[in-house]
Image (cartoon, rainbow, N blue to C red):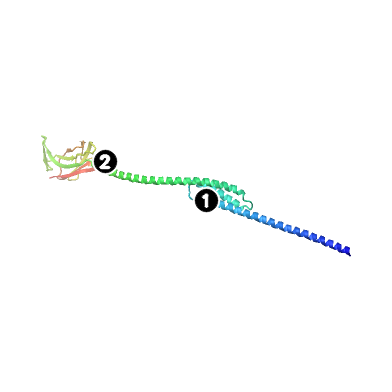
């Protein structure tokens, strides 16, 4: 009986020992699982946090480039290329499910490039500001110069008109009269158409110190009471205009007053009013009339 009791006690001890070992094993397994889970969670949290930081930094880079590109400087093409690199890296990081620390070095290079480009861009902006200021100043100066030139041009044009007008010769005291020329050479002035055989046309060219000196030709037109042009009846053209004249008077003008007189021979002069017109080329410069009875 005592031996059976001892055997039962030994078996119980063995069972208890086995259960204790199993319990300890279970506790160790649970602890190990819990520790591993915490480690995984910690690593995952760390990975997510690092990813967010990288994404944040990259987004800031992109924002900086977007702002610089919007300024539309001469470096816009270079800035766009670098921004596209940043956008490409953002997409890679966003798709990554593991360790993103490998992207840190790429971010560092992009950040360094960004600093260099931003410095160059700022330099260009300052230069553009200076150039714009200089250009605006130049525009103002050119504008003032243009106004002065226009004013001087206007004055010169007015002066040229005054000089041109002043340099034209003035024909004065134009007169027409009739004479009876006798065989002896004696001339007797008359107002009788039947007695006259010469018409005398005279005029004065006034002194003008600014006029061009030299030979001048005046076309004299004498029209009788029947609207006939007397004398040579030659026609000369001046562009689209034409003139039928009685005779041409050539004058040597030397800026001093010149008296001009020329006879127009004829016969059977009609009674009535005669008209005398003196032309400087196609410009009528003087006129008069006289009457024969």
Q: Which residue is mark 2?
A: 237
Query: Where residue 131 sits in the image (x, y, percent)?
Result: 43, 45
Q: Which residue is mark 1?
A: 64
Mark 1 is surrounded, within 10 Å at the Cα level, by few (under 14), some (14 to 19) or many (20 or more) other residues, namely some
Q: Nearer the viewer, residue 187 or 288?
A: 288
Residue drawn where x is 26% and y is 41% of the image: 237
Q: State how many labels appear.
A: 2
Mark with earlier residue (2, 1): 1
Q: Nearer the viewer, residue 132 or 291?
A: 132
Residue drawn where x is 78% and y is 60% of the image: 20
Residue drawn where x is 58% and y is 50% of the image: 89
Secondary structure under the numbered disc 1 in the rendered image:
helix
Q: Quadrant of residue 283?
A: top left
Q: Is residue 113 visible?
A: yes
Query: Where residue 49 sits in the image (x, y, percent)?
Result: 61, 54
Secondary structure under the numbered disc 2 in the rendered image:
strand
Mark 2 is surrounded, within 10 Å at the Cα level, by few (under 14), some (14 to 19) or many (20 or more) other residues, namely few
Looking at the image, residue 214 lies above or below residue 35: above
Query: Where residue 136 sits in the image (x, y, percent)?
Result: 40, 47
2 or 1: mark nearer the eye: 1
Query: Where residue 154 sits in the image (x, y, percent)?
Result: 30, 45
Looking at the image, residue 191 lies above or below residue 11: above
Q: Nearer the viewer, residue 124 or 40?
A: 40
Mark 2–mark 1 Cα distance, whole angstroms, equals: 80 Å
- 156 to the left or right of 89: left
- 61 to the left or right of 206: right
């Amino acid at each position: 009986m005592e031996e059976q009791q001892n055997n039962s006690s030994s078996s119980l001890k063995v069972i208890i020992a086995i259960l204790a070992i199993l319990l300890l094993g279970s506790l160790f397994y649970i602890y190990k699982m819990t520790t591993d889970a915490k480690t995984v969670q910690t690593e995952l949290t760390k990975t997510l946090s690092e990813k967010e930081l990288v994404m944040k930094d990259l987004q800031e880079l992109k924002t900086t480039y977007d702002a610089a590109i919007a300024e539309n400087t001469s470096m816009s093409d270079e800035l766009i290329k670098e921004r596209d690199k940043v956008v490409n890296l953002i997409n890679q990081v966003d798709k990554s499910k593991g360790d993103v620390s490998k992207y840190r070095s790429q971010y560092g290079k992009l950040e360094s490039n960004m600093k260099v480009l931003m410095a160059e861009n700022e330099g260009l902006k300052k230069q553009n500001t200076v150039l714009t200021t200089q250009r605006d100043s130049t525009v103002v100066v050119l504008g003032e110069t243009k106004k002065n030139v226009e004013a001087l041009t206007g004055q010169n044009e007015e002066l040229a008109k005054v000089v041109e007008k002043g340099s034209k010769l003035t024909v004065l005291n134009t007169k027409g009269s009739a004479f009876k020329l006798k065989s002896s050479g004696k001339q007797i002035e008359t107002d009788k158409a039947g007695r006259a055989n010469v018409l005398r046309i005279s005029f004065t060219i006034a002194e003008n110190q600014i006029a061009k000196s030299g030979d001048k030709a005046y076309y004299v037109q004498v029209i009788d009471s029947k609207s006939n042009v007397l004398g040579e009846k030659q026609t000369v053209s001046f562009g689209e205009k034409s003139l039928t004249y009685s005779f041409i008077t050539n004058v040597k003008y030397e800026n001093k007053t010149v008296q001009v007189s020329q006879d127009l021979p004829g016969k059977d002069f009609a009674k009535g009013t005669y008209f005398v017109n003196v032309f400087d080329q196609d410009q009528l410069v003087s006129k008069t009339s006289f009457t024969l009875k």
